[in-house]
């Protein structure tokens, strides 16, 4: 059975914890899109980790962790992560890398930074991890697939020459930076070959056999619905699809094999980077929520940037769950809200004097003002509670109000950052 774990909103919903938790009873975990531009924070018996490329199931010795063909693979970063977790006592994970995955090149990272510098105040808030230039090259058909590392030297050098001709025009005339050489790029690719060779696999064939054998498989997505390039807050989005439907493509399996879609939803809102964020809050109110939030404050796992904070947004979440095809909602960081006397919830948007509960396109989203309802808080610590019935009444009311507003079943409630701090609801 294949289960996808994805985000409903802007990312940072807590997908890493949910993946780590569900991996305990799974066989295979696959990253199917994105790169090292975002991170999943995990707290377990080994300590606290921020994973950027490794799937969040690497902490179990019975699992196989896969880098799918849809991932922007930064090979040095992948192997740094493996070393980092090993140094903290985690057993060496079983890793497979798709031979069809494409590689983030050093010049992608440089070009990403140069473009943000050129755009200055109109930049996209990139993490400068090379993701947009990488995906641009992939779809322009001038990227380098892992399989090409094993091509003959003459063919590979020939392709490098053709690719860097384009890059050098940009470097010389747009960015005024040093140029690339064939020897330099070829040497980099040979370093990557040496590192990744033992792990390269026909992942689609491997998964075909695994599905036939009845293995339990998790697809782990990066970021969330609002960052999808088609259905998100374009253009302030990422460069690969963040939707569960893309999991089939990014892993190499038939779409009908995805039987369950767990969409992770935060009990309040947060976002890293630029873009429309209707329920955003500011000042002391935001600082307090940021300080208390997450698993040690709301700061980006990759950038360390303070996350933008907001109240729960039913409009965005309903839409985000719908386009994911949600079967189950995992509701996270609920314990954070225990300090509040009352909790605002955004239940609609006012746009040009009219109130809507439908999430609009970005041009209309810019005009949207939040419409709030306030719910009473529960003013007590809920960590340690393991049964839904034992949660304070106002806490249950908050969950059930949001469940009704978004229209999707909340079947898991996370009341702490630890692996087993989870409450299951029978729906």
Image: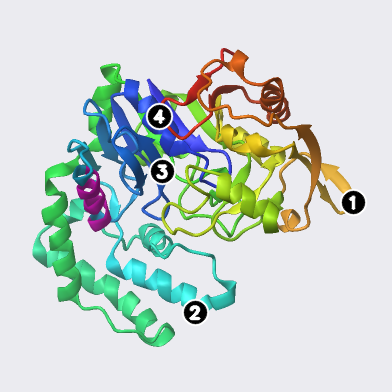
Residue 18 seen in the current view: yes
Q: CA distance from mark 2 to mark 4?
A: 43 Å
Q: CA distance from mark 1 to mark 3?
A: 40 Å
Label 2 crowd bin: few (<14), some (14–19), many (20+), radius 10 Å? few
Label 1 crowd bin: few (<14), some (14–19), many (20+), radius 10 Å? few
Numbered circles on residues, count: 4
On the image, which quarter does residue 178 sit in? bottom left
Label 3 crowd bin: few (<14), some (14–19), many (20+), radius 10 Å? many
Q: CA distance from mark 4 to mark 1?
A: 45 Å
Q: Which residue is mark 1?
A: 353
The spot of residue 412 in percent (x, y) is 53, 23
Q: Which residue is mark 3?
A: 41
Asked if labels 1 and 4 touch by Cβ distance under 8 angstroms, the answer is no
- Compared with 387, 223 (above or below) is below
The residue positioned 43% from the left and 40% from the top of the image is 221
Disc 4 secondary structure class: loop
Q: Which residue is mark 4?
A: 419
Tell me which secondary structure the magenta stretch mostly adopts: helix
Q: Which mark is residue 118?
A: 2
Q: CA distance from mark 2 to mark 1?
A: 38 Å
Q: Which comes sooner in the sequence, label 1 or label 3? A: 3
Asked if labels 3 and 4 touch by Cβ distance under 8 angstroms, the answer is no
Disc 1 secondary structure class: loop
């Amino acid at each position: 059975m294949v289960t996808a774990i994805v985000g409903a909103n802007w990312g940072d919903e807590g997908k890493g914890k949910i993946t780590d938790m569900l991996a305990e009873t799974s066989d295979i975990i696959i990253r199917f899109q994105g790169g090292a531009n975002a991170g999943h924070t995990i707290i377990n018996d080994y300590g606290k980790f921020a994973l950027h490329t490794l799937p969040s199931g690497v902490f179990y010795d019975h699992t196989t962790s896969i880098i799918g063909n849809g991932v922007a693979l930064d090979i040095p970063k992948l192997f740094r992560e493996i070393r980092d977790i090993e140094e903290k006592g985690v057993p060496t994970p079983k890793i497979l890398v798709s031979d069809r995955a494409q590689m983030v090149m050093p010049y992608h990272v440089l070009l990403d930074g140069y473009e943000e510098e050129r755009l200055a105040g109109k930049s996209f808030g990139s993490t400068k991890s090379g993701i947009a230039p990488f995906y641009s090259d992939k779809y322009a058909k001038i990227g380098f697939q892992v399989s090409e590392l094993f091509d003959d030297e003459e063919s590979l050098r020939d392709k490098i020459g053709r690719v860097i001709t384009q890059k050098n025009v940009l470097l010389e005339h747009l960015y005024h930076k040093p140029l690339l050489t064939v020897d330099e790029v070829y040497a980099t690719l040979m370093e990557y070959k040496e590192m990744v060779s033992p792990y390269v696999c026909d992942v689609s064939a491997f998964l075909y056999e695994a599905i036939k054998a009845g293995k339990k498989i998790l697809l782990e997505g990066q970021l969330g619905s609002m960052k999808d390039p088609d259905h998100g807050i374009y253009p302030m989005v990422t460069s690969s699809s963040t939707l569960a439907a893309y999991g089939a493509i990014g892993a190499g399996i038939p779409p009908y094999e995805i039987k369950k879609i767990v969409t992770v939803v935060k009990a309040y809102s947060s976002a890293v980077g630029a873009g429309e964020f209707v329920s955003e809050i500011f000042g002391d109110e935001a600082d307090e929520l940021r300080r208390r939030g997450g698993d040690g404050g709301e700061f980006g796992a990759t950038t360390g940037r303070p996350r933008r904070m907001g109240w729960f947004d039913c409009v965005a979440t309903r839409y985000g769950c719908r386009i994911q095809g949600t079967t189950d909602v995992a509701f996270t960081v609920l314990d954070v809200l225990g300090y509040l006397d009352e909790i605002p919830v955004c239940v609609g948007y006012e746009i040009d004097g009219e109130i809507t509960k439908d999430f609009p396109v970005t041009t209309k989203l810019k005009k949207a003002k939040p419409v709030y309802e306030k719910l009473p808080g529960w003013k007590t610590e809920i960590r340690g509670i393991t049964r839904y019935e034992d949660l304070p009444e106002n806490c249950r009311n908050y969950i059930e109000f949001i469940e009704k507003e978004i229209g999707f079943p909340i079947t898991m409630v996370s009341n702490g950052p630890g692996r087993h701090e989870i409450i299951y609801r029978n729906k």
